[in-house]
Every structure is written in structure tokens, then in C-alpha cells.
């Protein structure tokens, strides 16, 4: 855990950092400065590309509701998982990535040492009370040398973080409103999960948690 000064385009900024694991860096509260703009941008995206519950290749409906913005979006159906430029629900391209999303993802990645991260996909997850995300790896992206940046908004979740093997020991970490995490290098293919959300409420989102994940899919 450390409280460090960084020189950025905006001047000097103070960032609270926690090393979660090798090459996994938590920037606690890093999104707070933009919280209102971020949530307004989520509302704009979901008006064009509503949240939906995707079906896994195995035929299970996911309890997390999802949508995307940016040039590519992550989708799942009976045929498999993939990134696609077209939203299967609307038949149209995904909404553009809001500038505030892109800038935040790039800045966070740069703080973690990924200077030229340019995400082409932002997956937006919505968790309601009881929603969970079962243990998985994120390996649908072409280049796993590129990090993933996640932004948590709304009610807290307990995140589970393991190793590169499904059965590796796992640690539990709370992720709360405004937390940003950069997952790269040796953490990039780690198994992870979100435990069922407990009832709670946040002044800006109500009883919901929103998670943004920025990815370089291609
Ligand atoms: C560690 N989302 O969308 S964000 C996902 O809170 C996903 O919605 C969770 O797992 C959520 O795939 C967790 C944290 C996260 C995202 C991607 C990772 C952790 C990661 C990729 C590799 C390792
Ligand atoms: Fe994931």
C-alpha cells in the first residue's frame, strides 16, 4: 500500500495504490473525480444498447446483465464467446466509447506502466443483489500482453482473485465505488470471480453495482 505522486498531463497527482498481486494494481478511489460523468455516460450507452442477460455456450443465462461500448463488444451465445462490432440485440454497431471512459482507462493503465494501452472494447456489467460472476479467465482477447482495466461503481462487491490454475488459492478483495484496477503481466490470465452481491444501496446507483472493463480485444 502506498500513497504516491505522479506527473501526468494534468500536472502532479496523488494516487493511493495497493498491490493486489504480481502486476495487479488497485487504484483506490481513482474514478471518484469523474463519478458523475461516468455514470451519465453509462446511462447514455444503455439507452442505445440496453443491458441484457447473455446465454453461455453451455446454455446458462448469466445473472450479470451486460452491454458494451467502443468499436468491439464482448458477446456470448450458444455458439461461443467472442468480440463483435455489431450488437446482436440491436443489429447496430455498439455505442462509441465516451471520451471520459477512454481517458480514465488510459491514465490508469499508464500509472501501472502500460503507456500505450488503447482499449477497443468496454464491457459494462450490471450486478443486482444476489448476482454473481463465476470463476473464469479472460482469454478472448488477441494479445494477453495488453492489460485489462476495471472500474467499479455503485454498491460494493467481494472480488475473488486466484492464480493461473482454477484450483489455485484465492484471496478476497472488496471493490467499492470509484476503485480502479489494472490487471496485466503475470495477473492477466488469473482466475477470478465476483461473489453474490449483498443487499446495499449507493446514493448514485441505488441497489446496483456497475463494473466497466476496458480491453484491447484485437
Ligand atoms: C483479473 N468482471 O468482466 S472486474 C469480467 O467486477 C469480470 O464485473 C468482474 O471479471 C466485475 O470479465 C471483475 C476485475 C477483473 C477484470 C478482468 C480481469 C479482474 C481481472 C482479467 C484478468 C485478471
Ligand atoms: Fe473477468
Image: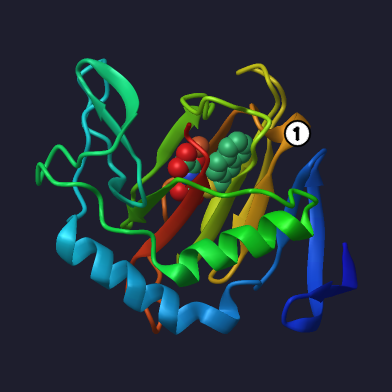
Residue shown at 10%/41% (left/top)? 91
- Above or below, 203 against 113 in this view is below
- Residue 155 in sight: no
Pointer 1 residue: 185
Residue shown at 44%/56% (left/top)? 211
- Above or below, 48 against 25 in this view is below
Residue 43 spot, x, y in % from top left: 26, 71
Residue 61 spot, x, y in % from top left: 21, 32
* Image quadrant in which the N terminus is located: bottom right
For residue 167, side relative to residue 158 (left or right): right
Residue shown at 26%/15% (left/top)? 58
Residue 29 spot, x, y in % from top left: 65, 73
- Above or below, 78 against 170 in this view is above
The foreground one among 23 and 62 is 23
For residue 47, side relative to residue 11 (left or right): left
Q: Secondary structure at mark 1?
A: helix
- Above or below, 62 against 198 in this view is above
The foreground one among 55 and 169 is 55
Residue 71 spot, x, y in % from top left: 35, 46
Amino acid at each position: 500500500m502506498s500513497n504516491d505522486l505522479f506527473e501526468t498531463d494534468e500536472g502532479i497527482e496523488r494516487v493511493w495504490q495497493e498491490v493486489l498481486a504480481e502486476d495487479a494494481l488497485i487504484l483506490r478511489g481513482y474514478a471518484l473525480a469523474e463519478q458523475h460523468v461516468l455514470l451519465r455516460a453509462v446511462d447514455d450507452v444503455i439507452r442505445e444498447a440496453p443491458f441484457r442477460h447473455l446465454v453461455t455456450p453451455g446454455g446458462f443465462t448469466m445473472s450479470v446483465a451486460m452491454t458494451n461500448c467502443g468499436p468491439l463488444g464482448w458477446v456470448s451465445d450458444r455458439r461461443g464467446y467472442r468480440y463483435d462490432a455489431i450488437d446482436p440485440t440491436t443489429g447496430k454497431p455498439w455505442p462509441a466509447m465516451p471520451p471520459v471512459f477512454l481517458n480514465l482507462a488510459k491514465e490508469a493503465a499508464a500509472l501501472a506502466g502500460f503507456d500505450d494501452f488503447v482499449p477497443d472494447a468496454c464491457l459494462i456489467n450490471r450486478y443486482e443483489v444476489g448476482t454473481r460472476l463465476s470463476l473464469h479467465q479472460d482469454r478472448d482477447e488477441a494479445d494477453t500482453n495488453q492489460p485489462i482495466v476495471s472500474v467499479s461503481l455503485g454498491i460494493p462487491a467481494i472480488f475473488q482473485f486466484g492464480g493461473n490454475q482454477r484450483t489455485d488459492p484465492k484471496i478476497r478483495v472488496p471493490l467499492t465505488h470509484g476503485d480502479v484496477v489494472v490487471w496485466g503481466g503475470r495477473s492477466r490470465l488469473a482466475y477470478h470471480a465476483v461473489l453474490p452481491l449483498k443487499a446495499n444501496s449507493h446514493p448514485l446507483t441505488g441497489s446496483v453495482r456497475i463494473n466497466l472493463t476496458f480491453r484491447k480485444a484485437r
